[in-house]
Image (spheres, rainbow, N blue to C red):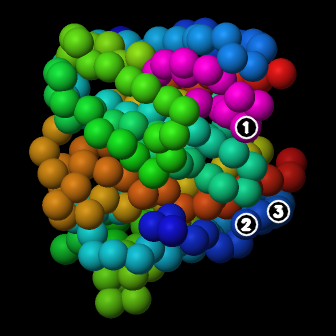
Amino acid sequence: EAQVTQNPRYLITVTGKKLTVTCSQNMNHEYMSWYRQDPGLGLRQIYYSMNVEVTDKGDVPEGYKVSRKEKRNFPLILESPSPNQTSLYFCASSLGGTGSSTEAFFGQGTRLTVV
Amino acid sequence: SQQGEEDPQALSIQEGENATMNCSYKTSINNLQWYRQNSGRGLVHLILIRSNEREKHSGRLRVTLDTSKKSSSLLITASRAADTASYFCASRMDSSYKLIFGSGTRLLVRP
């Protein structure tokens, strides 16, 4: 089954404790991205990757890091989480190509709380 | 902000009625997509309309696109309680991989 898998689904952590949210897709997609969703602000892109070893900042990259060492995996790293990073996070993947007429596939989300 | 706007923010209808949601975007696009999100879960792709298309149907869904007004609408006919969800439009520009999401419409279908 074609899918994007995020882990964990729920995470409560303390300020400053490094964490990683994993994302894996089994569709051989070139393009992967991370979004955060906050009430009243919709989905905002954090980082994206156009292929292995190619990543770039989205609209709200501060406080986040990513890596793309393999095509299928795109982990999101919070080196020193802060309470304003409490949010619902989504990983998404799609076939590559600028202006591509293809859909994005989303993971089930990771609800992160930083206390 | 690059984000699009959706209207209305919330919509409550009776089962069997039609639901119409509108989306506006800011730049010229290659395509516009609609997604559905059940509470707190991942987004699911519903339908995609290309910039050279004006209308598209999929089951009970009808999407229109007006590139001169930079707007799109999603019509769900004969709504069901299971259609209760948030609906988002997402536009993709010609020269970009990026999807720009609207703010979403929360649809409640009352049984």
- Per the model, the C-alpha gap separating discs 3 and 2 is 10 Å
| Residue wearing tag 3 | B12
* A8, above or below A64, in the image: above
| Residue wearing tag 1 | A84
Looking at the rendered structure, the kind of residue marked 1 is Asn
Q: Which residues are magenta?
A: A76-89
- Per the model, the C-alpha gap separating discs 3 and 1 is 32 Å
Q: Is residue A91 left or right of residue B5?
A: left
Residue B16 percent across, percent down from the top left: 73, 59
Other-residue count near label 2 (Cα within 10 Å), few / some / many at <14 / 14–19 / ≥20:
some
Identify the residue shown where x is 67% and y is 33%: A85
Local SS, label 1: helix
Q: Mark 2 vs mark 1: give the one in front.
A: 1
Residues flagged by tags 3 and 1 on a common chain = no
Other-residue count near label 1 (Cα within 10 Å), few / some / many at <14 / 14–19 / ≥20:
few
Instruction: Verify whether residue A83 appears in magenta.
Output: yes
Residue B38 percent across, percent down from the top left: 67, 37
Q: Is residue A95 left or right of residue B2?
A: left
Q: Which chain's residue wears label 1?
A: A
CB-based contact (under 8 Å), mark 3 and mark 1: no
* A101, above or below B13, in the image: above
| Residue wearing tag 2 | B9
Identify the residue shown where x is 18% and y is 22%: A53
Identify the residue shown where x is 19% and y is 74%: B52
Task: Answer yes or no: is residue B111 visible.
Answer: yes
Looking at the rendered structure, the kind of residue marked 3 is Ser
* A98, above or below A17, in the image: below
